[in-house]
């Protein structure tokens, strides 16, 4: 096990407008482990239909095809190539204790979190449907890949921590497939679809700059996109009760302060002694420095280790 790898919840984008959600939480208990993510992924068909009422309107407005129109005249923020690469480095420092985020394409192990195997650049899990979704989508485009034979077993273990039908060959097959550019590209696409793009779009709608967009993205990665109090949309909902977003005429710094306070508390509900340095000595440091644009050079600490990006 990589020493700094934390519990990583697989995520699915949630379509929201203010307090309207398409995805129902699987566990309303703030002290629990978050939403039923297997259920969340099985709700994808409903989400693809883009819901109804306000959620449908927001989804249509926030679709990537309309990004240029929505944010005309604004900086691309975290979506700019250099900033996006920086975001992956920042996440990797907390998730894998490295800035070399591309080294995680071939990563796979059971980290003992009850989600089966955790794998790849953003922690796809055999127990939370997202790894299955990744392999199924990849297989539609590349039917002869080395993981296709495991799809029946992945369907059987979905929602559990079981390795039945996967051992002993699945981990080797994953590592071999990760040497192929097409599979690395598929991991990138799934990361963007379920984590990066929804977080960045919503941050832009809230009027947040590059740092705020990263704050949302990292929270989406760690907490998952559920609506309970310990998941991303629940955290955002509580932050909105404490401070106004820039879109609502509020101070960006004050809003991000509130969001990070609530996020840190949500991390502690997972485990009282959890290390919160990815917030305390990284994101909070950038905010206290007034670096809302996430300008380089950057220096931060995670788990006592210092990282620098010139």
Image (spheres, helix red, strand yellow):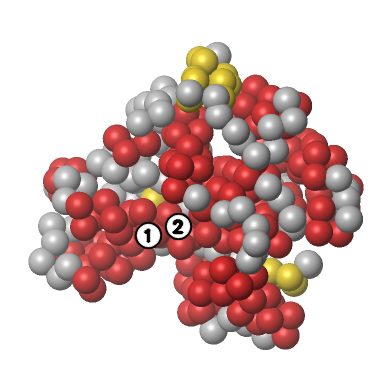
Number of numbered discs present? 2
Q: Which one is in front, 211 or 42? A: 211
Residue drawn 23% across the image and 55% down it:
183
Residue 264: quadrant of the picture:
top right
| Residue 221: x %, y % from top left | 53, 47
Q: Which residue is mark 2?
A: 192
Residue 224: x and y, percent?
57, 52
In the figure, is residue 28 to the left or right of 244? left
Q: Residue furthest front?
A: 73
Q: Circle 2 — which element?
A: helix
Residue beneath the point at 50% across and 33% down: 90
Res. 125 in view? no
Q: Is residue 196 above or below residue 135?
A: above
Q: Nearer the viewer, residue 14 or 289?
A: 289
Q: How far across and how far down the image is residue 11, in percent?
A: 51, 56
Q: Is residue 118 left or right of residue 63?
A: left
Q: CA distance from mark 1 to mark 2?
A: 5 Å
- Residue that mark 1 sits on: 189
Q: Which is nearer the eye, 114 or 80?
A: 80
Look at the numbered discs 1 and 2 and tell me whether their residues touch, using CB distance below 8 Å. Answer: yes
């Amino acid at each position: 096990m990589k020493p700094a790898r934390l519990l990583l919840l697989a995520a699915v984008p949630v379509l929201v407008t203010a307090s309207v959600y398409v995805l129902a939480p699987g566990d309303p208990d703030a002290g629990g482990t978050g939403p039923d993510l297997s259920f969340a992924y099985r709700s994808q068909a409903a989400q693809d239909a883009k819901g109804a009422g306000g959620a449908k309107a927001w989804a249509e407005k926030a679709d990537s095809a309309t990004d240029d129109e929505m944010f005309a005249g604004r900086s691309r923020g975290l979506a700019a190539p250099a900033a996006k690469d920086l975001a992956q480095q920042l996440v990797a420092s907390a998730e894998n204790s490295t800035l070399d985020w591309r080294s995680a394409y071939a990563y796979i192990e059971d980290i003992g979190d009850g989600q089966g195997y955790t794998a790849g650049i953003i922690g796809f899990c055999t127990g939370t449907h997202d790894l299955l979704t990744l392999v199924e989508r990849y297989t539609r485009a590349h039917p002869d890949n080395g993981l296709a034979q495991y799809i029946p077993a992945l369907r059987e273990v979905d929602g559990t921590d079981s390795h039945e039908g996967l051992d002993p060959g699945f981990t080797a097959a994953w590592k071999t497939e990760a040497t192929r550019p097409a599979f690395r590209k598929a991991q990138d696409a799934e990361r963007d679809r379920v984590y990066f793009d929804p977080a960045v779009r919503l941050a832009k709608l809230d009027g947040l700059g590059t740092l705020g967009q990263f704050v949302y993205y990292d929270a989406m990665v760690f907490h998952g996109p559920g609506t309970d109090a310990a998941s991303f949309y629940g955290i955002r909902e509580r932050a909105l009760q404490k401070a106004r977003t820039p879109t609502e005429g509020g101070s960006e710094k004050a809003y991000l302060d509130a969001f990070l306070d609530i996020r840190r508390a949500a991390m502690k509900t997972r485990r009282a002694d959890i290390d919160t340095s990815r917030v305390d000595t990284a994101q909070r440091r950038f905010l206290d420095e007034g670096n809302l644009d996430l300008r380089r050079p950057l220096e931060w600490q995670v788990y006592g280790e210092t990282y620098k990006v010139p």
